Each structure stands twice: as structure tokens, then as C-alpha cells.
Image (tube, grey):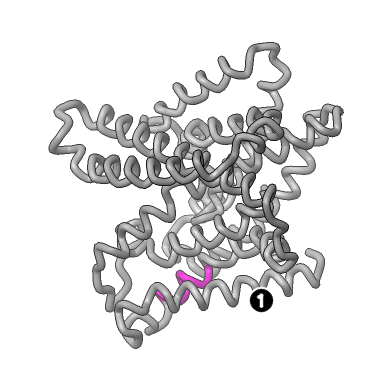
Amino acid sequence: MAFCRPILILLLLLYHAFIIYIGEWSAPFGFVPNEYYAWLARLSYSFMLPMFVFMSGYIWGWQCHTRGSKESLKELFNRKFVRLYLPCLFFGILYIALLGDGEASLFRNIYQIVMGVGHLWFLPMLFLCFMTCWFLVQIKVPSSYVFVGCVVLSVFSAIPQVPQRIADTLLYFQFFYGGVIVSQQRVFLEQKANLSLIVPLWVLFLVVFVLLSVLSDHVDSIVLWTSLMDDILLVACRILYAWLGLISLYLTALYICREHQLPQLYIKVGKYCMGIYIFQQFILKILYYHTDFMVNIYPLFVPWIALGISLFFSILLTFMFKKTRL
């Protein structure tokens, strides 16, 4: 998994630097649309978050499998609360102070902090994945049945009435549990990972991603169902190409780590991923919405320069936090 971390954090930076081109963030002053950049944003997002969740389940499953010991719920809760939820609360307060809506009520701000404001939503969702998986592994049900059930339940994430963090967990838990299952088949899969399998998988992923993305863009005109059914179809499309991209990257990682030794610098960069994830959106939002950055830079260069600035300062801030041992 050391191979995947720097790649995924680069995809995360790409997505957030280019997110303004797909309308997920409001257009900053001086914004110039670019359809090619919109596709780059979609591609970088396609399997990035599912792979992060898959890695978490994979590492936890591998640790449980190799150590041969079962962690109690209390031990897991305490460990992941410190690792995931405390950063969510601490940096959530900072996010509200620097980037929050000044007109929001105190209750609204507290709610956002607890649920994960901005990009920090990922942390409580991952915390719920760990807790849910602990209960599921206690149940003596074949893992394949549980996995299929998780995939089926993920379509309910499209229902508007489902609370947001529950919907997020329903959608992403299949990737977490899939990682737990795959971790126990690592040796077998490592033997099967070769270029004759990996290259066609990447090609298949790109083809399916493009086709399903085009379908998603025109779903309202193609599907004559209810809006809910349209949303379920969109979720199904995203799940399909996310799994294809995830599997392709995982097998690529197995192949490269088997054939080559990763440079120490590359591995060290991977250890900064959590910090980069935390800081990068702060920096990008300040650049896009609280400076004249967009106006003073040639439009084609805007997201690339923003990406470089956010990467540099994210690494710097992470280094400083590591030195303080917070």
C-alpha cells in the first residue's frame, strides 16, 4: 500500500485544484470554464476516495490476519477516535473560523464540526466504517454474502432522506469491507499480478469511465424514470468504474512492489498523506476565494499553480505539525 499513497494524494490534490471546473465549488471571481479540466477533475476523483477507504480496510484486515489477535471494540474505538475523529473536530473548528459562513448559527456550526465540515467529512465516515466492520466480523456469515449485501445497500445512499454521513458510509463501506477480504488473499493475488492482466484492466477502466460519465451527464434525457431512480443509476455507474480503477491500481501496486524496491523518498512522502489531506483544501480555498490569484494568473495555468502551491504548503505544514508531535 506504500505505492498507492502518494498516487492517491496526488489525485486528491488534482481533484480539489480542478474541482471548480465541474461546479462542485462555486466559481471564483475571474473563473474561466474549461471542459478538458472538467474531465481531468472527474478522472482524478473516479476511484480515488474508494481506494483510500479500500486501503484502510485492507491494512486493518491484514493486521488482524497476521497478528492473529482480535482487537476489542473499546480498543478500536479509542484508537480510531484519536486518529480520525479528534483531527476532524480540531481542524473543523479551524475550518469554520477561517472559511465558515459568518451568518450560520452556533448550532449549525457545531453540527458541521461534529459531522465533518468541508473535506473533513471523510474522517467520521471512515470512523463509522471501522466500527461497522468490527461488528460484522463478529458475525459468522460468509464474507461473500456480507460483501454482496454491502453493495446492494450502497444504492440506498442515493435516497435524499438518508442522513448524509449514514449515506456516505453506506456508499463507501463496500470498499472498506472489500479491502478486508482482499487482504487475506494478498499472496495469491500477488502471484497473479502481471502486465498481461494489468494493462487490459486499465484500458477497460478508462473505456467504462468515459462511457458511464457520458451516460451520467445525459441521464435526465435518457432515463424516463423518477429522479430517485436516476440517482440510483448514477451511484451504480460510479461504483462500477470505481471498482475497476481500484482493482487496476491495487494490482499495479502488487506488481511494482514485487518487481522493484520503492525509493525511500517515495515511501517518506506517503507518510505525509494524512497531513496533506488535512491542509490542502484550506490552502486552495484561501487561494481561490480570498485572494486575487484567479485574476492575476493566465487561466490555463491557474489550477496547476494552485496545485503546486497547495502541495508545497501542505507538506510544510505537515512537517511542522510532526515536529510539534501534536
Q: Count the numbered circles shown.
A: 1
Report which quarter residue 132 is drawn in.
Answer: top right
Report which quarter residue 154 is drawn in.
Answer: top left
Report which quarter residue 216 is drawn in.
Answer: top left
Q: Looking at the image, is 2 positioned above or below residue 34?
A: above
Q: Does the magenta segment cover residue 219?
A: no
Q: Is residue 264 left or right of 152 when viewed as pictured?
A: right
Q: Looking at the image, is 9 positioned above or below residue 53?
A: below
The answer to whether residue 160 is seen in the rendering is no
Q: Residue furthest front?
A: 196
Residue 48 in the image, given as x and y percentages of width and height: 50, 49
Residue 89 in the image, given as x and y percentages of width and height: 64, 54
**Which residues make up the magenta segment?**
282-289
The answer to whether residue 205 is seen in the rendering is yes
Magenta segment main secondary structure: helix
Q: Is residue 16 left or right of 312 when viewed as pictured?
A: left
Q: Residue at coordinates 62% horizontally, 55% vertically from top-left?
A: 5
Q: Is residue 97 left or right of 188 when viewed as pictured?
A: left
- Residue type at numbered disc 1: Leu
Q: Which residue is identified by label 1?
A: 316
Q: Looking at the image, is 15 positioned above or below residue 201?
A: below
**Mark 1 closeness class: few <14, some 14–19, many ≥20 residues within 10 Å:** some
In front of the other: 251 or 224: 251
Q: Does the magenta segment cover residue 285?
A: yes
Q: Quadrant of the C terminus?
A: bottom right
Element under disc 1: helix
Q: Residue at coordinates 69% horizontally, 34% vertically from top-left?
A: 186
In front of the other: 211 or 285: 211
Residue 298 in the image, given as x and y percentages of width and height: 31, 84
Residue 40 in the image, given as x and y percentages of width and height: 36, 60
Q: Is residue 20 left or right of 179 when viewed as pictured?
A: left
Q: Residue furthest bottom?
A: 296
